[in-house]
Image (cartoon, rainbow, N blue to C red):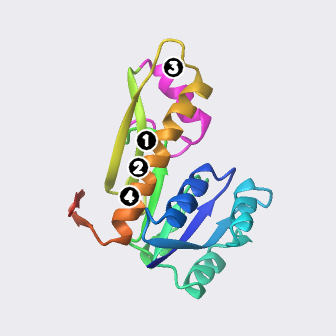
C-alpha cells in the first residue's frame, strides 16, 4: 500500500473523495498527510476528522521535507492554487498528479482556476467541458494527461451549476487515476500516458 500526500488550498471536496476511496479499498493507498497553503482551508478539518496529519505550510522546501518525512509515494494536487517549482517537480517526477476542471489544453494555465474556468467556458460558448487529471511538470497544466471525462454545457448553466457537474467528474477520474498510479498501471511514452490493465 502506497503513502499518499495531498496538497490543497480550499474546501477539500476532492480530498474527501480520495479519503473515501482509500478507506473503502478502491485506492490501494492511504492518505498520510494533507498540506494546505491556506491556514483556514476546510480541507485541513476534513483530514483531522479522519485522523490524518494536517499541516499549514507555505514554504516549498518545508513541504518537500514533510512529504519525505512521511515517506510519501504519490503526491496529489487537489485544488492547490499555487504553481510549484521545477525543484519540487523533480523530487516527485511522474509521482505527482493534478486535477484541473476543464478539458486541457482548453481553459487552463496561469489564471485559470476555480470558478474562473467555468465562467470562461460559458463565455466562450463551448458545448462540452469536463475535467483532466495529468502528471505535473514544470509548466502550468502542461504535464502528460492521464484521464479526461466530459460533461455537456447546457443553455441554462452558469458557472456555479457547471462547477457542480464538473466536480462529480473530477471525483471519479481523480480517484481512478490515483488507483492506477498506486497499482503501477500507468506508463508514459513521450507525452502519451498508457493504462496497463
Dot 4 or dot 1: first in sequence order is 1
Label 4 and label 3: CA atoms lie apart by 30 Å
Label 1 and label 2: CA atoms lie apart by 8 Å
Q: Which residue in the structure is indicated by mark 4? A: 177
Extreme right residue here?
Answer: 40
For marks 1 and 2, give the one nearer the viewer: 2
Looking at the rendering, which quadrant does residue 119 occupy? top right
Label 1 and label 3: CA atoms lie apart by 18 Å
Determine whether 123 is above or below 1 in the image.
above
Q: Position of residue 162 (x, y in %)?
A: 54, 27
Q: Which residue in the structure is indicated by mark 1? A: 131
Read off the magenta span: 106-125
Look at the image and say whether residue 180 sits in the magenta stretch.
no
At 48% from the left and 26% from the top, the residue drawn is: 121
Is 96 left, or right, of 167 in this rendering?
left
For marks 3 and 2, give the one nearer the viewer: 2
Q: Secondary structure at mark 2?
A: helix
Dot 4 or dot 3: first in sequence order is 3
Q: Residues within 10 Å of mark 2 (few under 14, many from 20)?
A: some
Determine whether 167 is above or below 176 in the image.
above
Q: Residues within 10 Å of mark 4 (few under 14, many from 20)?
A: many
Dot 3 or dot 2: first in sequence order is 3
Label 2 and label 4: CA atoms lie apart by 6 Å
Is 23 left, or right, of 106 in this rendering?
right
For marks 4 and 1, give the one nearer the viewer: 4
Q: Are marks 2 and 4 in contact (CB under 8 Å)?
A: yes
Q: Are marks 1 and 2 in contact (CB under 8 Å)?
A: yes
Q: Which residue in the structure is indicated by mark 2? A: 173
Q: Which residue in the structure is indicated by mark 3? A: 123
At 61% from the left and 55% from the top, the residue drawn is: 16
Amino acid at each position: 500500500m502506497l503513502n499518499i500526500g495531498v496538497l490543497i488550498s480550499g474546501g477539500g471536496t476532492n480530498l474527501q473523495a480520495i479519503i473515501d476511496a482509500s478507506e473503502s479499498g478502491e485506492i490501494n493507498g492511504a492518505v498520510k498527510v494533507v498540506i494546505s497553503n491556506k491556514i483556514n482551508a476546510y480541507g485541513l478539518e476534513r483530514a483531522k476528522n479522519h485522523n490524518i496529519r494536517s499541516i499549514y505550510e507555505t514554504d516549498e522546501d518545508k513541504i518537500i521535507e514533510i512529504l519525505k518525512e512521511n515517506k510519501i509515494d504519490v503526491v496529489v494536487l487537489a485544488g492547490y492554487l499555487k504553481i510549484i517549482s521545477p525543484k519540487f517537480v523533480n523530487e516527485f517526477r511522474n509521482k505527482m498528479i493534478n486535477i484541473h476542471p476543464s478539458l486541457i489544453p482548453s481553459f487552463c494555465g496561469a489564471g485559470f482556476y476555480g470558478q474562473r474556468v467555468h465562467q470562461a467556458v460559458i463565455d466562450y460558448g463551448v458545448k462540452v467541458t469536463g475535467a483532466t487529471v495529468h502528471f505535473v511538470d514544470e509548466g502550468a497544466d502542461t504535464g502528460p494527461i492521464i484521464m479526461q471525462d466530459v460533461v455537456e454545457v447546457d443553455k441554462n448553466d452558469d458557472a456555479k451549476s457547471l462547477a457542480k457537474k464538473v466536480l462529480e467528474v473530477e471525483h471519479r477520474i481523480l480517484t481512478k487515476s490515483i488507483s492506477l498510479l498506486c497499482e503501477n498501471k500507468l506508463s508514459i511514452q513521450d507525452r502519451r500516458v498508457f493504462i496497463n490493465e
